[in-house]
Image (spheres, coloured by chain):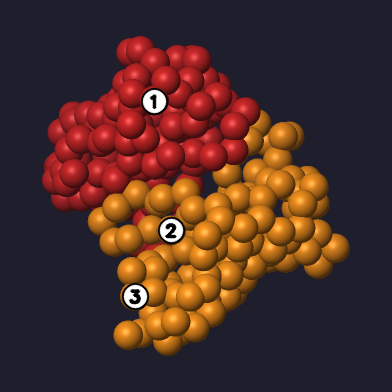
Chain colours: A red, B orange
């Protein structure tokens, strides 16, 4: 099983809503990542979790709140987002934090209205 | 400041011919390089990688070449197939960056039947 799953596939939310994105992997990977990708741009790293602990936060606004409940799950809680936050949100995992190869999920297409 | 650059936004190749995708980098600390393929509405899929101690890595139809002195790498696909049509991202990492991936802006490859 080399799959990273993400739900939902699509999400439309208003600026006052609270929603969560979910990511799951069952490969025993101990590092998990959130990326944001705008159209025709490369993925940009947001957060890194190493062994279920937040190790890197790339100066992401507090309206994005990550959570790692266990080694297989990664959530991204969203609150008071802006229209410019509309993007594809990608989750990835790697076997260890020091391993280069990251495996990506299909992403959640988020639209903020 | 783009540390990883893919200067060709698009490339069209006839089926059966060779596709050559190029990538340049500026950070001499990068010591590992990866290529990802991305179809629309899907997450990036890991294709092939190369460590800076090598100058070539081959996997089936895919070969990556690294020229450290020129800070340049390329992905060769031979023979190209219509199913190879996708956006290809080059990525780089260094041990000093906790193995974070820095992506290029991508090249849209279209393989014409």
Q: Is residue B62 above or below residue A95?
A: below
**Disc 1: host chain:** A
> Disc number at residue B82?
3
Q: Is residue B100 above or below residue B76?
A: above
Question: Does mark 3 fall on the same chain as mark 1?
Answer: no
**Disc 1 + disc 2, Cβ < 8 Å:** no
Q: Is residue A52 above or below residue B100?
A: above
Q: Which residue is mark 1?
A: A27
Q: Quadrant of residue A7?
A: top left
Judging depth in this view, the residue of A29 and B9 nearest the camera is A29
Q: Which residue is mark 2?
A: B37
Which mark is first along the chain, 3 or 2? 2
Q: Quadrant of residue A22?
A: top left
Residue A18 location (% of width, % of height)? 18, 29
Residue at horizontal 29 percent and vertical 53 percent from the top: B42
Q: Is residue B51 above or below residue A39?
A: above
Give SS at disc 3: helix
**Disc 3: host chain:** B
């Amino acid at each position: 099983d080399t799959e990273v799953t993400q739900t939902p596939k699509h999400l439309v939310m208003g600026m006052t809503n609270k929603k969560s994105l979910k990511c799951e992997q069952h490969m025993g990977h101990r590092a998990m990542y959130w990326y944001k990708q705008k159209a025709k741009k490369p993925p940009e790293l947001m957060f890194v979790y190493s062994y279920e602990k937040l190790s890197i936060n790339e100066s992401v606004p507090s309206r994005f709140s990550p959570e790692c409940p266990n080694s297989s799950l990664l959530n991204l809680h969203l609150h008071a987002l802006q229209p410019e936050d509309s993007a594809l949100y990608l989750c990835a995992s790697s076997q260890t934090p020091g391993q280069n190869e990251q495996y990506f999920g299909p992403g959640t297409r988020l639209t903020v209205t | 400041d783009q540390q990883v650059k893919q200067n060709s936004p698009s490339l069209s190749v006839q089926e059966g011919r060779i596709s050559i995708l190029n990538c340049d980098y500026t950070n001499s600390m990068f010591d590992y390089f990866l290529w990802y393929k991305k179809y629309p509405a899907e997450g990036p899929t890991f294709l092939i990688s190369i460590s800076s101690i090598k100058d070539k890595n081959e996997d089936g139809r895919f070969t990556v070449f690294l020229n450290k002195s020129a800070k340049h790498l390329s992905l060769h696909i031979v023979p190209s197939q219509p199913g190879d049509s996708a956006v290809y991202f080059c990525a780089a990492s260094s041990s000093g960056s906790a193995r974070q991936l820095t992506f290029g802006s991508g090249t849209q490859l279209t393989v014409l039947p």
